[in-house]
Image (tube, rainbow, N blue to C red):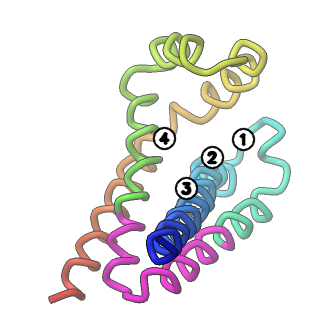
Amino acid sequence: MKKIKRKIKKHVKERTYFAVYKAIYITGLAILIPMIFAFAFGGEGPWYSKPITYIFSSLFLIFFAFFGMLKRKRTLSETLKSLGKMSLVPGFIALVFYAFGGTIVYSFMRVFVPGFDAVEPFVRVFIESSVPRMGILVLGYIVVGAVLYYLGESIKK
């Protein structure tokens, strides 16, 4: 019985670590979406105040998650494949905003996200200022995700 409890505890601990590292990695990628454009093209809004700070912060989060996952997975191949899959998430979310516009997404968020009405004006300003320029970034995240996954697969062989 103690062996089973120990295995369950170890499994839950590992899953928790991976969930935290995944959240940190996706947060780092999500910060990069508006910041690259703020840095490259300029812009207006409170999130554009110091884009270089946000870019360095997001890169720190990305590297922290990379090394944390590498320590847990113990293989570069599996780490790259996991990061590749996770890189696709912000890309597909941005693709949904880019393809369908805010109306459908806002309707979905009002139904499934409690308290969304309170933050909707802020989200709307952010989306309206960022989405028109996101086409290249959407493609960028999808390409980065695919390349990371491919590298993970090719290292394994």
Looking at the picture, how far across and down is residue 91, in whole percent? 41, 47
Spatial CA distance of label 4 from label 1 is 13 Å
**Magenta stretch mostly in which secondary structure?**
helix
Q: Mark 2 points at which residue?
A: 34
Packing grade of label 3 (10 A; few <14, some 14-19, many >=20) is many
Per the image, label 2 sits on a secondary structure element best described as: helix
Which residue is label 3 attached to? Answer: 26
Q: Are marks 2 and 1 in contact (CB under 8 Å)?
A: yes
**Amino acid at circle 3:** Ile
The type of residue carrying mark 2 is Pro
Query: Is 92 a magenta residue?
Result: no
Whichever of callouts 4 and 1 sits on the residue coming sooner in the sequence is 1
Q: Position of residue 142 (x, y in %)?
A: 34, 54
Residue 36 drawn above or below residue 2: above
Left or right: residue 54 compared with residue 155:
right
Asked if the residues shown at circle 2 and circle 3 are in contact, with their CB atoms under 8 angstroms apart, the answer is no
Foreground disc of the pair 3, 4: 3
Could you tell me which residue is drawn at 39 percent across and 36 percent down? 95
Quick one: SS at disc 3?
Answer: helix
Residue at the (83%, 39%) spot, across then down: 46
Total labels drawn: 4
* Residue placed under numbered mark 1 in the picture: 43
**Residues at marks 1 and 3, CA–CA distance in whole angstroms:** 23 Å
